[in-house]
Each structure stands twice: as structure tokens, then as C-alpha cells.
């Protein structure tokens, strides 16, 4: 069964939210609504990694998270759901672990300092393939890259490094990083051949929701791309994606229920 990871951004510049907000109350309300709608995991982020996004210091990142994270953790755990913090900063990760989160979602792929923080805890670690964070517009892998072969090799090497640093591979979730140095062709390649990445034996998380590669099939703004997102999510669910990270939890929960019912 594919699990749904709901996105909660505590930023002023998210690319896919119609009204980005730093307000802690808004983040708590959004998390509560997503849990009610059926989210299995709430992923809270305080730094936008969109193209042209501005980096934030660990101190500023934590200042954004601290007023809302404990309540989101409480709400999620009361429902049997998990909380993830989307951060590339080991100092932020360490504080988030102290606040009771279940996952660290590292868009920089679990470097040595992050590995040391995670190794001293029992949280899961999501590692994402990326060329640059925040995304640098126009910086992509070569057009002819076989994405599955490339990402598979990258993950295998990173899993070995994490194991050497004391992070059990059984705690690691893999994200191929759609939109982080990929062309639309690369993105569709990953989506079409995702099951091949199961050969590594680790759960797969796909974060495709509302991303820019969808501009090849729709001209609506990012915040209005849920129909395309849902169509691709249906394919991912049927291909056995373990987690999908999405903005519109309610519609994805309804889609999942329908696919289950149709399967008998």
C-alpha cells in the first residue's frame, strides 16, 4: 500500500503553494487538516528548495519550525501518523529529533554530518538525489542519462557510506529527486521505470507533486497542477511506490481508496 506524505511548508516562498506562510498557526492547521484527510506522514519544511530559492541559516530554519513542530508531532502521533522534517542542516535535524520527529528528509542525500546525527538516533532517513540545493535553473544531468542506472548507482554508493557511518540501511528511504537536476524527460523516465529501483531493497519515496516538469503537459500555475499530479500518482501507486509526497492529501486518499476498491 502506498502511503501518503503530506507537505507542510513554513516558508514565505514555496513554489507550489498559492499562499505561502510563516505563521505557525497556519502550519498547525494545515497539518491537522492533512491528518484528517488521511496523511500517513506530515513532512514539515522551513526552507524552500525551489529554483532561485534563498538559503536560510540553521538558526532561521529552527526559528520557523520551533513554534509549530511540537504541536504537529503531538497531533500526528495521536493519530498513529509520523512526522518528517525536510532539512539539509544537521543542526536542525538534531533539534527536530529532540522534538520527537520520526524522519529526517535530507534533500542533500545524507552527508557525513547528517549521518552522524542520524546514527545517534532511531529516526528514519530519507536521502534524495540532487545536483544542487536549492535548485540551480538550467543545471541538469546530460540529456541522454539513463536515470534509473544513474540513480541506482548513486543510491548504492550512498547506502554504503551511511552504513559505514553507523546508519543501518534498514532505516533509509530513497527519493530519486525529481526536479533536482532533471529534465522533463528524466522525470518521466523515473516515473515510468520506478519499480527497477526496488532492486536496492529499500522503500521508495517520490516527490512529484506540482513540479515544473508538468509544464510539458499543462500551462496552469504550479498551485493548480493537482489533476496532473493525481494522474501520475495513480501510476505510481500501481507501480508500488512506497510513499508519495504530495500537497493535496484529500484527493490522493480518495484515489488510493478507489484503486483499492477496484482491486477487489
Image: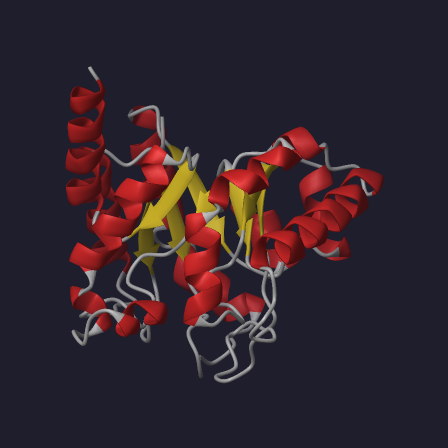
Horizontal side, residue 192 vs residue 202: left or right? left
In this figure, which colouring scheme has been used for the structure? secondary structure
Q: Position of residue 150 (x, y in %)?
A: 66, 58
- Nearest the viewer among 193 and 48 is 193
In the displayed structure, would residue 199 be above or below residue 261? below
- Nearest the viewer among 102 and 154 is 154
Horizontal side, residue 204 vs residue 145: left or right? left
In the displayed structure, would residue 176 be above or below residue 42? below
Image quadrant containing the C terminus: top left
- Considering every residue shown, the one lying at the far front of the view is 144
Q: Give the tally of numbered discs.
A: 0
**Do we see residue 143 in this rendering?**
yes
- Considering every residue shown, the one lying at the far right of the view is 164
| Residue at image location 18% in from the left, 37% down from the top | 255
**Do we see residue 4 in this rendering?**
no
Q: Position of residue 19 (x, y in %)?
A: 19, 70
Q: Position of residue 263 (x, y in %)?
A: 22, 20
Q: Quadrant of residue 129?
A: bottom right
| Residue at image location 44% in from the left, 62% down from the top | 187
In the displayed structure, would residue 24 be above or below residue 115? below
- Nearest the viewer among 39 and 177 is 177
| Residue at image location 60% in from the left, 60% down from the top | 146
| Residue at image location 57% in from the left, 49% down from the top | 95
Image quadrant containing the N terminus: top left
Q: Position of residue 92 (x, y in %)?
A: 57, 56
Amino acid at each position: 500500500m502506498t502511503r501518503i506524505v503530506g507537505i507542510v511548508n513554513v516558508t514565505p516562498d514555496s513554489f507550489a503553494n498559492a499562499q505561502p506562510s510563516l505563521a505557525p498557526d497556519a502550519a498547525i492547521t494545515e497539518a491537522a487538516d492533512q491528518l484528517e484527510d488521511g496523511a500517513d506522514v506530515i513532512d514539515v519544511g522551513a526552507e524552500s528548495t525551489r529554483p532561485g530559492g534563498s538559503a536560510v541559516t540553521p538558526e532561521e530554519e529552527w526559528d520557523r519550525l520551533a513554534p509549530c513542530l511540537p504541536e504537529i508531532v503531538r497531533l500526528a502521533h495521536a493519530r498513529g501518523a509520523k512526522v518528517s522534517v525536510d532539512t539539509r542542516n544537521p543542526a536542525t535535524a538534531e533539534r527536530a529529533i529532540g522534538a520527537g520527529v520520526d524522519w529526517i528528509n535530507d534533500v542533500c542525500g545524507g552527508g557525513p554530518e547528517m549521518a552522524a546525527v542520524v546514527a545517534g538516533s532511531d529516526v528514519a532517513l530519507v536521502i534524495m538525489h540532487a545536483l544542487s540545493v536549492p535548485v540551480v535553473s538550467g543545471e541538469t544531468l546530460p540529456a541522454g542519462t539513463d536515470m534509473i542506472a544513474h540513480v541506482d548507482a548513486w543510491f548504492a554508493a550512498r547506502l554504503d557510506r551511511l552504513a559505514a557511518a553507523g546508519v543501518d540501511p534498514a532505516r533509509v528511504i530513497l527519493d530519486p529527486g525529481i526536479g533536482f537536476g532533471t529534465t522533463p524527460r528524466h522525470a518521466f523516465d523515473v516515473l515510468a521505470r520506478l519499480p527497477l529501483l526496488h532492486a536496492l531493497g529499500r522503500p521508495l519515496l517520490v516527490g512529484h507533486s506540482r513540479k515544473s516538469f508538468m509544464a510539458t503537459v499543462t500551462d496552469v500555475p504550479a498551485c493548480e497542477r493537482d489533476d496532473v499530479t493525481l494522474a501520475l500518482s495513480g501510476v505510481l501507486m500501481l507501480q508500488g511506490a512506497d510513499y508519495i509526497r504530495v500537497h493535496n492529501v484529500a484527493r490522493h486518499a480518495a484515489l488510493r481508496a478507489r484503486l483499492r476498491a477496484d482491486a477487489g
